[in-house]
Image (cartoon, rainbow, N blue to C red):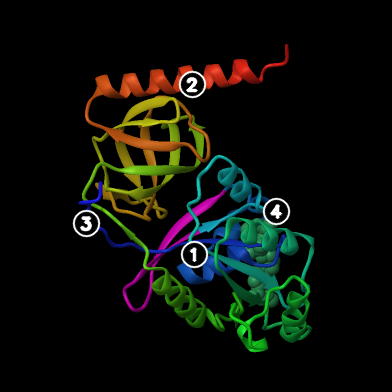
């Protein structure tokens, strides 16, 4: 619709980097939470989706990836939700195999990157070496007169975190990210699961429009009605604007990461759309099945 009124929306930032380089710790420091401590073995198993309010009142949405499988899988399914990648590199460990993979995925996606050189509190930290080694992967950071923003941080001491946020907001400003909040919502499934008590739960990121409690929806081949929505701190929400991640209750089954959620005007329409999508999915499976 060319008549749509687009309004500025928060950037969606995906955090990538090698195992244990401090992705979740950085987000914890930014959010004032302690997710790492609650993780089995300190390993991120699920995609986390969070929105923070910056000191200046701007919002930034963060996706924390368990490895970058989730990022690649979603992209393969056509879900390009990431505006900016923050590449986390531990200053003691340096460039590792998964750092290189993250660089390659980011380049393939054509998404701008900001390098956060983490663990700079450690005596063995060598941020300059990280910058030099990045050159081998054609990443030329500002410090080396390039155009990729970089910042020295410590999730432990909080060093550089304000600067990291500033750089994210600067990058976002250049991109002029906009969406129309005044329409029926479209969202992308970030992750989904079956909860014993609550039933199917999906964490979705609103792409455009505003998702509301009571909305009738189709997501992948499932349909339902938004019974409740929770933010990343478990607070109930009545509505979710563009770039807001929320957990949705009320879907008939468990959708897949990367599935599109579409709000429709009636239950009749929801049944039609989900039946159509089921046919398409079946046709695709039949076509792909070995003879
Ligand atoms: P995965 O999700 O398993 O890939 O790890 P991650 O990248 O999320 O790293 P995580 O936040 O789990 O941190 C790994 C370890 O590094 C933990 O023991 C953290 O306490 C530690 N760590 C993270 N950031 C810093 C930092 O800035 N300084 C120091 N000294 N330790 C840190
Ligand atoms: Na970890
Ligand atoms: Mg983690």
| Label 3 within 8 A of ligand 3 by Cβ | no
Q: Is residue 123 above or below residue 43?
A: below
The mark nearer the N terminus, 3 or 1, is 3
Question: Would residue 8 appear left or right of 192 to someone viewing this image?
Answer: left
The mark nearer the N terminus, 4 or 2, is 4
Q: Is residue 108 above or below residue 128?
A: above
Tell me the element at label 2.
helix
Q: Which residue is mark 3?
A: 5
Q: Is residue 48 above or below residue 138?
A: above
10 Å crowding of disc 1: few (<14), some (14-19), many (20+) = few
Q: Which residue is mark 4?
A: 41
Residue 150: % across, % down: 60, 80
Q: Which residue is mark 2?
A: 280
The mark nearer the N terminus, 3 or 4, is 3
The mark nearer the N terminus, 1 or 2, is 1
Q: Residue at x 62, y 48 (%)?
A: 72
Q: Residue at x 59, y 42 (%)?
A: 76
The mark nearer the N terminus, 2 or 3, is 3
Residue 261: % across, % down: 39, 37
State yes or no: discs 1 and 2 in contact (Cβ < 8 Å): no
Q: Which residue is mark 1?
A: 33
Q: Is residue 89 above or below residue 178?
A: below
10 Å crowding of disc 2: few (<14), some (14-19), many (20+) = few
Quadrant of the picture in which ligand 1 is shown: bottom right
Query: Which residues fall within the magenta stretch?
Result: 47-62
State yes or no: discs 3 and 1 in contact (Cβ < 8 Å): no
Question: Would residue 74 appear left or right of 124 to someone viewing this image?
Answer: left
- Calculate the distance from the C-alpha at mark 3 to the C-alpha at mark 1: 36 Å
From the viewer's side, name the closer residue of 224 and 108.
Answer: 108
- Calculate the distance from the C-alpha at mark 4 to the C-alpha at mark 2: 41 Å
């Amino acid at each position: 619709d060319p008549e749509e009124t687009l309004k500025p929306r928060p950037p969606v930032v995906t955090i990538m980097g090698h195992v244990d380089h401090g992705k979740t710790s950085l987000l914890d420091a930014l959010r004032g939470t302690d997710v790492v401590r609650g993780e089995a073995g300190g390993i991120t198993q699920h995609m986390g989706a969070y929105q923070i309010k910056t000191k200046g009142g701007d919002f930034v949405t963060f996706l924390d990836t368990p490895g970058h499988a989730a990022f690649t899988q979603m992209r393969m399914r056509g879900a390009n939700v990431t505006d900016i990648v923050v590449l986390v590199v531990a200053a003691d460990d340096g460039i590792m195999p998964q750092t290189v993979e993250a660089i390659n995925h980011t380049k393939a996606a054509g998404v701008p990157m900001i390098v956060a050189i983490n663990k700079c509190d450690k005596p063995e930290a060598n941020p300059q070496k990280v910058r030099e080694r990045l050159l081998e992967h054609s990443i030329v950071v500002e410090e080396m007169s390039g155009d990729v923003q970089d910042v020295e941080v410590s999730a432990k001491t909080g060093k550089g975190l304000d600067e990291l946020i500033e750089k994210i907001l600067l990058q976002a400003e250049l991109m002029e990210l906009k969406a129309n909040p005044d329409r029926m919502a479209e969202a992308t499934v970030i992750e989904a699961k079956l909860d014993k008590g609550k039933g199917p739960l999906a964490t979705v990121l609103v792409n455009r429009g505003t998702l509301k409690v009571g909305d009738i929806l189709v997501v992948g081949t499932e349909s339902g009605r938004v019974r409740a929505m929770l933010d990343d701190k478990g607070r109930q929400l009545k509505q979710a604007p563009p770039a807001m991640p929320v957990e949705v209750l009320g879907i008939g089954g468990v959708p897949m990461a990367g599935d599109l959620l579409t709000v429709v005007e009636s239950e009749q329409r929801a049944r039609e759309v989900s039946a159509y999508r089921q046919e398409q999915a079946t046709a695709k499976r039949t076509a792909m099945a070995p003879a």
